[in-house]
Amino acid sequence: RDAQESRGLGDVYKRQAQVVRECRKKNIPVNNASDRDQCDFYFPGIAKDGDTVVGITSGGRDHKLAAKISQAVRNVLHV
């Protein structure tokens, strides 16, 4: 069963990489959340207070750190 599940995951990763290649050929921005090198954009953590909006991202390197900093900014803004 483990080998079958591993093979299934390998197929998923291959399909994800294929989708990324096809999108990039057509200049369509794409994200494969499983592989930072296959991400063309990132969704920032947002802290908003009225007209003030702050977006925080770690460039795909450390999502937990970005979330922690986003919460800290929200606390400063009292959001």
Image (cartoon, rainbow, N blue to C red):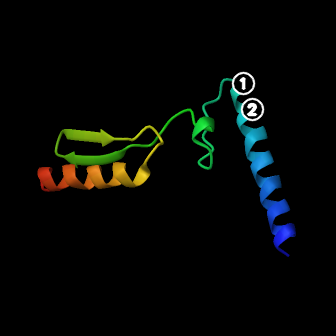
Q: x, y percentage for residue 60?
A: 48, 42
User: Residue 2's quadrant in the figure?
Assistant: bottom right
Q: CA distance from mark 2 to mark 1?
A: 9 Å
Crowding at label 1, few (<14), some or many (≥20) Cα neighbours within 10 Å? few
Q: Is residue 42 left or right of residue 27?
A: left
Pick out the residue farthest to the bottom. 1
Q: Which mark is residue 6?
A: none
Residue drawn at (16%, 56%), measured in percent from left and top? 75
- Quickly name the residue at label 1: 26
Residue drawn at (60%, 40%), measured in percent from left and top? 31
For the C terminus, the quadrant is bottom left
Q: Is residue 64 left or right of residue 36?
A: left
Q: Is residue 28 above or below residue 10?
A: above
Q: x, y percentage for residue 8?
A: 82, 61
Residue drawn at (56%, 32%), measured in percent from left and top? 40
Foreground tag (2 vs 1):
2
- Quickly name the residue at label 2: 21
For the N terminus, the quadrant is bottom right
Query: Tag 1's secondary structure?
Result: loop
Query: Tag 2's secondary structure?
Result: helix
The image shows a total of numbered marks equal to: 2
Pick out the residue farthest to the front. 3
Q: x, y percentage for residue 26?
A: 72, 24
- In this view, the residue in front, 5 or 79, is 5
Q: x, y percentage for residue 34?
A: 62, 50
**Amino acid type, residue under disc 2 in the picture:** Arg
Q: Earlier in the sequence, mark 2 or mark 1?
A: 2
Residue drawn at (47%, 39%), measured in percent from left and top? 42
Crowding at label 2, few (<14), some or many (≥20) Cα neighbours within 10 Å? some
**Amino acid type, residue under disc 1 in the picture:** Lys
Q: Is residue 61 left or right of residue 8?
A: left
- In this view, the residue in front, 21 or 66, is 66
